Amino acid sequence: MAGIKSIGVYIPVYRLALEEIGRMWRVRGPVGEKAVAGYDEDTVTMAVAAARECKAGLPGQIDALYFATTTAPYREKQHAALAASVLDLDRGAYTADITCSLRGGTTALRAALDAVKAGSARECIVVAADCRMGAPRGRLEQLLGDGAGALVVGSRECVADIEESCSTYSEFTDVWRTDADPFLRSGEGRFIEEAGYMPTMVDAVSSMMKRSGAAASDFARVVFYAPDQRQHAALAEKLGFAPGQVQDPLFSAIGNTGAPAVLIMLAAALEEARPGERILLAGYGDGADVFTLRATDRIEKTRRHPLLKERLGRKSNIDYGTYLSWRGLVPFEASGLPERPQPSLASRWRERKFISALYGVRCTACGTPQMHAIGQNIRVCIACQAKDAFEPYSFADKRGTLFTYAVDHLQPTRNPPGLNGVVDFEDGGRMLCELTDYDLSRVRIGMPVEMTFRRFSDGKGPVNYFWKARPIVE
Amino acid sequence: MESMKDKVAIVGMGCTRFGERWDAGVEDLLVEAAYEAFEDAGIGPKDVQAAWLGTVFSGITAITLSPLGLQYIPMTRVENMCATGSEALRAASYAVAAGACDIALAIGVEKLKDSGLTGVKGPAIVGDNPDGTSGVASGFSAPASFAYLGTRYFHRYGLAPDYGKRLLAEIAVKNHYNGSLNPRAHFRNRLTVEQAVGAPIIAWPLGLYDCCGVSDGAAAAIVVRAGMAKDFRSDPVYVKALAVTAGARQGCMRQDYDYVHIEENVRASRAAYEQAGIRDPRKELSLAEVHDCFTCHELVLYEDLGFSPRGKAGEDIEAGAFSLTGELPVNTDGGLKCFGHPLGATGLRMMYEVYKQLQGKAGPRQVKDPRLGLVHNLGGNPGMGIASCVILGNE
C-alpha cells in the first residue's frame, strides 16, 4: 500500500489585508488577508522551502520529484530539475514538471502514487506552489494568495495510506491564461459554479464513493479545492458533509493558493488526524482527482511539528504600494547603480553545487569546513593550505549565528533598506550574505539564523537564485 | 631580503585638484599631474625613461598614457585596488633601485564621474567577479562591508551606539577641517559633530559624512636612485620602506577573524616599520596619511598601525591626538574623505602631501619639524584586502 510519509508547507510571512486592497480601490472587500510571496520569493523558492521541510529527517533515497504549478517562472526550463538540485537529490532521480492546471498538485500526487505502486520509485517528492496574480482592482486580486505544499510519497512507514484514487477530465474553461495574459483570466462566477465546478466535483466524488463503497459520514475529514469560500461551502452541503468534517480551506487566512491549495489543506488535516481516520481528498482543475486516505498509527508523529499553525502565526503585513512594487506592476526610475551583465552560464555551471545546495568543502587534512567568499572552487585550504584535499560539505541545513552586520541603504533590493552580514555556521565555516524576512528592530549580533533559497536580483539572463540567511524565530 | 630604505628618492611630484572635474578628461588630469611633477623635478618629458600608470577603472593598458607623448619608453599599467597609486610608485622604485632605469614616472589617475553614476563604477556588489558575471551576485555595498567593522568594534569594546557614532563623527570633523585648508581637496566645507551624527544613514553606523566621496583626479611622482637625488633638488624625499600585504580572503572564510582589526593593515605596517627602522610609530612618525574610505576604518587603523593600543583609539580621538596640532597628525590634507578617492591616484596623492610636509611647503597645514611620514592604503574590504604601506623621510 502506498501513501504519504511526510508533509511540508510553506506560506510566505507577508500578508496583504483585503481591507487594504478595498481601501485602495474604494470598494468594500471581503474580510481577511492574502499571503503574498516576498520580493525575493517565487514559485520555485516556495516549492523548495516546502520540499526541504517534508524531506527533512527522512533517511531514505528520493527517487523522483514532481513539481506542479500554474505560475512557472520559466516557459522552457524544467523546475523539477532545479528543485531537485537544491534538495541535492541523486542525479538518477526522475524529475517532471506538471504545469498549467489547478489540479497539478493532485495530478502530481497520482503520478507519484502510480510510480511507487509500480515499483519504479521507492520514495517521491510531490511539490506544488503557485504565485498567481489577479489584475489590479479586480475580484481575483482579492482572492488569490501564494504558497506551497509538499509530500513524500512512499510505500513504507507511511503516516497515511492512499487507498483509492480516480480521476476525471473536463474540457471546461473557467480560469485561464495565455502567453498574452500577465493576470489570471476568469469566466463569470455563476457560470463556473453551475456549469463547471459543482457538476465536475459532484460527479467525481460520487464516483469515488461508489467505487470505494463509502458514505459521506465515513470520512473524518474532507479536503477539496474550491474557487472561493461560498462554492466550498455549497459543495460540502451538496455532497452531504457536515461542517465538522470539512477541512478549513483557509481562504480568509491566506487566500486561494491555486495548485498547492489542497496539499496545504491536506497538511493541516494530517496534523490533526487520529490513527484510523479516513480522509477524502479532491483536487479540481480541468477535471478532478479524488483520493481516499486512511491515517495510520504513525500519524501521531506529524503532530510534533505543527507546521501550518506556525506558518500562519508568523506574519507581517504590507501595504498596497509594497505589493505593487514587489509584483513588478509599477515601473521605477532607473537606479543609480551600474547595470549588471548577464551572469555567465559557464561560471554558474561550475558553481552549481554552491548555488543550488550551498555546498562548500571540508578539508580532509585539517577538518575545516569552508565556503568560498564568491563561490569559486576551493583548491587550497584556507586554514592549512593543503591542496585538493577536500570532501563535499553542504551548509544548507546548518544553523548560523550573525557575527556582525549592516543595515545597508545602498544594497539593491526591492525592500530597502537591505540587511547583510557575516554568518558563522555551527560546526565551522563562515559566509557573507544577505538576510531576508527580518525585523530590523530585532537584529543583533549573535542572532541565530537558518539558510533559505531565494530569488536574487532581476535582470538579464536566467533567474538568479541563491541563498540568504533568515532569522530563526523560536 | 633587503630593505628598500634609502635606495630611492622622490625628486618631483604633481597633484591635480580632486573633485567632480567635468572640465577634464583622463588626458587632462594626466597632463596636469605629470607636468607639475616634471616642473617640480626640473625635468622634461624627454627625461622620463620608464613609466608606471596606476588606474583601476580608467584605462586597461598603459596606452592610456599616450596624452603625455612619451616616446617609445617602457610603460605598464598596474593595479592593486585602492592601493594602486602606491603600487605605481613601488614598481617605479624597484626599477630605478635595480638600475633598469635612472628616472621613472609613477602616475595614478581615475576619472570616475563620467559614468553618470553617484556611486563607484564597476562591481558595486561586494563578492562578485570583476566582470560582474559571477553566478552568485549577492548584493551588499562597500559601506556595508566596512560597517561590519564599526558594529563589531562597538560591540567588542562595549561602546554605546551613540558614543561610537560620535567618535566616528570626530574623525569626519577633523578631516573636514584639514580639507578646508587645502585648495586641491574635493570637499572644503567644515563640519560639526552634530551635522555628522545627524546626516542620513548609508549603512549604520556610517552616515553621509562617514563615507568618502567619488572623485576624479591624478597625481604623479618622479623617482630616481637615492645617490642621484641631490642632482635634482636640495630637498629630495627618500623612500624608507615599501610594503604590501595581500590576504587570501581568510577573514571572510574563517571564523577566527574578529572584524575589529584588519590583518593586512597590521602586517603591511609592521613590514614597513621594520624596513624603515621604526620601533615606536606613534612617536617616530611626524604624520600619517591613512585610508579613510570610511571613518570606522580610520578608527580601526589607529590601532592596526600601532598608534593606539587595541580598544583605546577612542581615548586618543577624544584627546585630539591625531588632529593637525596633535601628537601624530593623521590625514593632514583632508584624507579620502575630503580630498576624494580616485582610486588609482590616491596613494600618490597621499605621498604628495607627505612630500610637501617633509619639505616644509604645506602652508596652513604644516606640521612642526617633520622627519618621517607614513602612507597607508587598503584595497578591498575587511576580510579580503590588500594593504600597502610606504614610509617617506627627508633625511
Image (cartoon, rainbow, N blue to C red):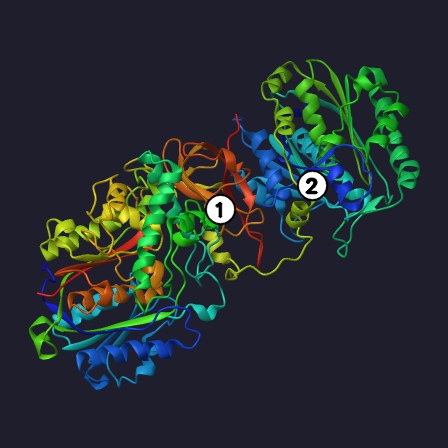
Residue drawn 77% across the image and 49% down it: A135
Residue B343, by quadrant, is bottom left
Is residue A101 among what the camera can see? no
Q: Is A212 placed above or below B154 here?
A: above
> SS for tag 2?
strand
Viewed as shown, does residue B175 lie left or right of A41?
left
The tag earlier along the polypeptide, 1 or 2, is 2
Left/right placement of residue B386 relative to residue A265 reads: left
> Mark 1 against mark 2, which lies toward the viewer?
2
Q: What is the chain identity of the residue bearing mark 2? A: A
* Residue type indicated by callout 2: Asp
Out of B29 and A221, give the one closest to the viewer: B29
Q: Residue at x 17, y 69 (%)?
A: B93
Q: Give the chain of mark 1.
A: A
The residue that label 1 is drawn on is A355
Percent position (x, y) of residue B18?
35, 69
Q: Amino acid at mark 1?
A: Ile
Task: Residue B282 in the image: state x and y as whole percent.
Answer: 16, 49
Which part of the image, by quadrant, shows the N terminus of chain A? top right
The residue under label 2 is A130
Residue A414 in the figure: left or right of residue A221:
left
The alpha-carbon separation of the residues under discs 1 and 2 comes to: 23 Å
Residue A307 in the image, given as x and y percentages of width and height: 61, 25
Q: Is residue A305 visible?
A: yes
Where does residue B340 sit, x and y in percent of width and height? 36, 63
How crowded pointer 2 is (Cα within 10 Å; few <14, some 14-19, many 20+) is rated as many
